[in-house]
Amino acid sequence: MSPSLWSRAATVAVLALAGLQFPQHAAAGGSVSSPTPNTCAGKFAYESAELTDAVLADIGAQDPASAPLLGFGDDPDSGSATRPPSGPACKVFPGDAAWPSTQLWNLFNTSLGGALIKTVPLAAPCYNNWPQRNAAECQYVTDHWADPHLHANDPASTQWPLFQGRTCLPTDDPTKNCTLGGYASYSVAVTKVSQIQLALNFARNTNIRLVVKNTGHDFADKSIGAGALSIWTHKLKDLRFFSDYRCKSYKGPAFQLGAGVETEEVYRAAELNGVTAVGGECRTVGIAGGYVAGGGHSPMTTLVGMGADQVISLQVVLPNGKFVTASEDSYPDLFWALRGGGGSTYGVVTSVVIKAYPKIPVTTMTFAFLNGPNVTLDTFWAGVGAYMSYFDRFTAAGAYGYFLVVGIGPGQYLFNFMPFWGGNMTAPQLTTLVSPFLTDLANLGIEVTPNITEYASFYRAFNGSFGPEQVGASVGHAGSRLFPRDNFAVPAKRNATLAAVRYAIEAGGVLVGYNIRPAANPAANQANAVNPAWRNSTGFFILGGPSLPATATDAEIAAAAKTLTTDWMKRWRDVSPGSGAYMSEGDINEPDFQQAFYGSYYQRLYALKKKYDPTGLFYAPTAVGSEDWYITGQIPYYPTQNGKLCRKP
Ligand SMILES: Cc1cc2nc3c(=O)[nH]c(=O)nc-3n(C[C@H](O)[C@H](O)[C@H](O)COP(=O)(O)OP(=O)(O)OC[C@H]3O[C@@H](n4cnc5c(N)ncnc54)[C@H](O)[C@@H]3O)c2cc1C
Ligand SMILES: *[C@@H]1O[C@H](CO)[C@@H](O)[C@H](O)[C@H]1NC(C)=O
Ligand SMILES: *[C@@H]1O[C@H](CO)[C@@H](O)[C@H](O)[C@H]1NC(C)=O
Ligand SMILES: *[C@@H]1O[C@H](CO)[C@@H](O)[C@H](O)[C@H]1NC(C)=O
Ligand SMILES: *[C@@H]1O[C@H](CO)[C@@H](O)[C@H](O)[C@H]1NC(C)=O
Ligand SMILES: *[C@@H]1O[C@H](CO)[C@@H](O)[C@H](O)[C@H]1NC(C)=O
Ligand SMILES: *[C@@H]1O[C@H](CO)[C@@H](O)[C@H](O)[C@H]1NC(C)=O
Ligand SMILES: *[C@@H]1O[C@H](CO)[C@@H](O)[C@H](O)[C@H]1NC(C)=O
Ligand SMILES: *[C@@H]1O[C@H](CO)[C@@H](O)[C@H](O)[C@H]1NC(C)=O
């Protein structure tokens, strides 16, 4: 260890031990606020323990050497956005001379109050080369690998181990070696804003890669990275309901959600308080993190708009380490970007205030059909096409459709509603809405037995309809496409769209489809960075790529990924020119991802990225500005986070 590093390290330790107790300093920094119900939200208790200039000045007075490690970055308006980036080409990586010593990590840990976790991969108990080797724990991880809770509850894991590099999957061969691969080196299990500020400052000042992990649901694994320090937001579970929130132009029910609150938690809270919240269809997706940042689609979207449209304000730690409120009149440009412009790009969101809606009844419908003796394959697809012909009518009525089209055996295909969702509809209303569609199916000779069930509330319908999700896929991945209304409303375009869909499914793809369109909602704030392609679409289709055995090699994975992107998805892009895809459930290999995921907003988002994060502290694959970076050692079409992160020359 170099002497200078030691002196810095010692400084941090002394300061930490001498009481780097941020709550005591927060009063001096001036931002402890006590929440006042039903006015613009204050902060949560964990947000009042702030690192401020005053605190840093206190520390600096005790030991000037602390500044290089803990100091804030430049202000966003300091002009650094216009300066060309300088410094080393790559982020400091484990094994590099500049990588912090174990002593320094320990001291950093002390300054964090002991919140630092050194990564032990979830499946480490399956391997002899880890001291955690334990057959029973290995069995548990193996049995639960497909359960999203397992990965959400772990600081480093991700729902999609594929882009981690598959270096530590559950196995029954303990003699294999488990390595960290694309998992972060260390995580901070944050419970206070001050820890996030310290971590951002530490990572920026030591030039270490930074990632932000909430639940790890993003399809491109935006929450992991080799050699990274990870901010793990999972423990920020505070949740507060305001029955009559009054802030700026809004008056009505609202929730304030900590960054770690998951969909099922807010739905349950909404049920208990007699209101309806906007969240995902999957139980474990985090709301304040990647969901709002990516746009966020919901069974409520066809009634009230996107998840991001519901946001009234956010609390956020900027890349320079400062903690601010983003709202209509505080950092309005950032407020715009944080609602749809992508996660892990402009800072770390610590909480969000979202609108809620009155309680509504929900009626669902399920049925399935197959081709077979009485239904030819052409007729099967005509049935799918018949559904598509109603996409516009159904979304206009506020309905949302969630369905699966998949091959289930040689030459045999299944269409399944999971379910058709009538938000704010009674059973008679839904029955009237769908009856022409059911008549069309009957006329085609497709027999179905619809199960129409009315529920008294959103939560009851959600609980009765959406089963546990399966994750953990380690060989395949998915792409997605937003199809404009005309793709289904104009017969010739519908035919072309159906042909492109049919091609992919008959080649072995899996369609997870949504009939969805964000409702125009004057009560929501829809002037945000949500991909404009969402606004005109009535179909959002996710396509799972070619199926592969678990034993597939990297080369086979790359070949399948290439087929997905350059053949199957290409046909989808070709029939929907100028539209886009959903960044949070997108293809990591999406060509021209800037246009596809951000549309016409990309240049504005990129300028804001430069303004708020001039040093490139935040990086995630396909995030705004990610084109300026690369990961070393990648093979085409199978990009992983297992490599050094370097700036493109
Ligand atoms: C099974 C499944 C079902 C899904 N269903 C839906 C659905 O119904 N609707 C929908 O819209 N999406 C859905 N998604 C996609 C999901 O919304 C996105 O993956 C979303 O990004 C998840 O956010 P997260 O914070 O939970 O996950 P993470 O993967 O942990 O984070 C996603 C991104 O946001 C960043 N991030 C997380 N927290 C913060 C924070 N506090 N501040 C700044 N950046 C942060 C991360 O760094 C990462 O870049 C689904 C995904 C899966 C796997
Ligand atoms: C950080 O400190 C806590 C409390 O002392 C300890 O449990 C944890 O293992 C430490 N983390 C690291 C990476 O050493
Ligand atoms: C695991 O790593 C050890 C030490 O690096 C090496 O000797 C051994 O061959 C490796 N085993 C396998 C299966 O790769
Ligand atoms: C096909 O139609 C015949 C005649 O209506 C009927 O008896 C038979 O059950 C049907 N088969 C299937 C698989 O639906
Ligand atoms: C539900 O329907 C009622 C009655 O038509 C309407 O007043 C209310 O605004 C609707 N709620 C939502 C969330 O669409
Ligand atoms: C219809 O669906 C509901 C909700 O899933 C279920 O409880 C009920 O058993 C189903 N009815 C039939 C006849 O399958
Ligand atoms: C949720 O679903 C479970 C199992 O289907 C059921 O036992 C439980 O009562 C449901 N809860 C609510 C609030 O509907
Ligand atoms: C669409 O396809 C159907 C069935 O293949 C065909 O009958 C119809 O003429 C086509 N319509 C248009 C507008 O291409
Ligand atoms: C949405 O549709 C409108 C009207 O058809 C069109 O003017 C607009 O350009 C479309 N927007 C996008 C992003 O496709």
Image (spheres, rainbow, N blue to C red):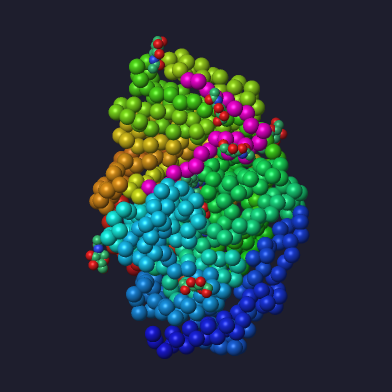
Residue at the location (41% across, 64% down)? 120
Is 142 part of what is drawn in magenta?
Answer: no
Quadrant location of the N terminus in the rendered image: bottom left
Can residue 456 be seen from the camera position used here? Answer: yes
Can residue 180 be seen from the camera position used here? Answer: no
| Segment tinted magenta in the rendering | 448-473
Determine the quadrant in which ligand 7 lies.
top right
Residue at the location (32% across, 29% down)? 409
- Residue 583, position in %: x, y? 46, 49
Residue at the location (47% across, 49% down)? 148
Q: Toward the viewer: 73 or 642? A: 642
Classify 132 as above or below 12.
above
Classify 298 as above or below 204.
above
Q: Dividing the picture into quarters, in which one does residue 52 lie?
A: bottom right
Q: Is residue 641 left or right of residue 282?
A: left
Classify 336 as above or below 371.
below
Is 456 part of what is drawn in magenta?
Answer: yes
Residue at the location (36% across, 28% down)? 413
- Residue 294, position in %: x, y? 51, 51
- Residue 55, position in %: x, y? 63, 79
Q: Toward the viewer: 435 or 524? A: 435
Q: Dividing the picture into quarters, in which one does residue 84 lie?
A: bottom left
- Residue 35, position in %: x, y? 74, 61
